[in-house]
Amino acid sequence: MFKINDYVVYGSTGVCQITDIKKDDHIDSDETEYYVLHPVYHSNITIKVPVNNPHIGMRAVLTKKDVLSLIAAMPESKPFLMENAKHRSDNFKAVLKTGNNEDLIKIIKTLYQEKKAKSFVNKKLTKTDEDIMNTAEKQLYEEFAIALNILPEEVLPYILKHIPHNNEN
């Protein structure tokens, strides 16, 4: 069970802070305990999530040690290899919903490499691919920022400083 002030990743909403744990009476008079979440990097929305619902897509934010381990493994991360653009796009969108950090890294690496290759022939990523890459970066950088106690815009420079440089990254 999470506590007040814990940071969690809530689905595609991203990093949220638990600001309260309350009980609420529903119509059937059962009292339900729920977390009150506030997204850290977004507007003033409030999300209520039942504490006892096992199907909630909520997990603890990675630790600094976990983030550093992911960063160290980035050079070995293999990009996704899919020729069919529609299938790839559908796969990427499914990954964005899961928030799996290893797969987010693969998406970013795949689309970064494609963007780089297209730039050599004066082309750009499709709008869909650009949106997917931006969403993957946002999700990853926000979680890394909380774990590393830095701002999201400082995450990419931090990563680049802490991984070995070679032509694939």
Image (spheres, rainbow, N blue to C red):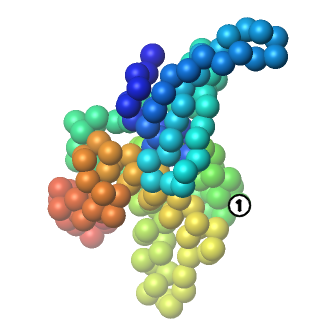
Is residue 35 in sight in this rendering? yes
Q: Amino acid at mark 1?
A: Lys
Residue 118 placement (x, y as % from top left): 50, 81
Residue at 41% x, 26% y is 4
Can you give x and y, in whole percent of width and height, for residue 35 in the image? Answer: 54, 26
Q: 80 or 33: which is nearer to us?
A: 33
Up-down relation of residue 83 to residue 15 (above or below) = below
Residue at position x 56%, y 76% in the image: 125
Q: Position of residue 16 (x, y in %)?
A: 47, 40
Q: Quadrant of residue 152?
A: bottom left
- Residue at x-position 60% and y-position 37%: 47
Query: Quick check: 122 left or right of 30?
Result: left
Q: Which residue lies most toward the bottom here?
A: 122
Image quarter of residue 12: top right
Label 1 neighbour load within 10 Å: few <14, some 14-19, many 20+? few
SS for callout 1: helix
Front one among 94 and 37: 37
Check the image and report above or below for 36 versus 2: below
Q: Position of residue 15 (x, y in %)?
A: 45, 43
In the image, what residue occupies the spot 24% across and 39% down? 64
Q: Nearer the viewer, residue 6 or 147?
A: 6
Work out whether 142 lies above or below 16: below
Decide if residue 75 is in sight here. no
Give the mark count: 1
The residue where tag 1 is placed is 86
Residue 66 location, quadrant: top left
* 51 left or right, relative to 165: right
Q: Quadrant of the N terminus?
A: top left
The quadrant of the image that shows the C terminus is bottom left
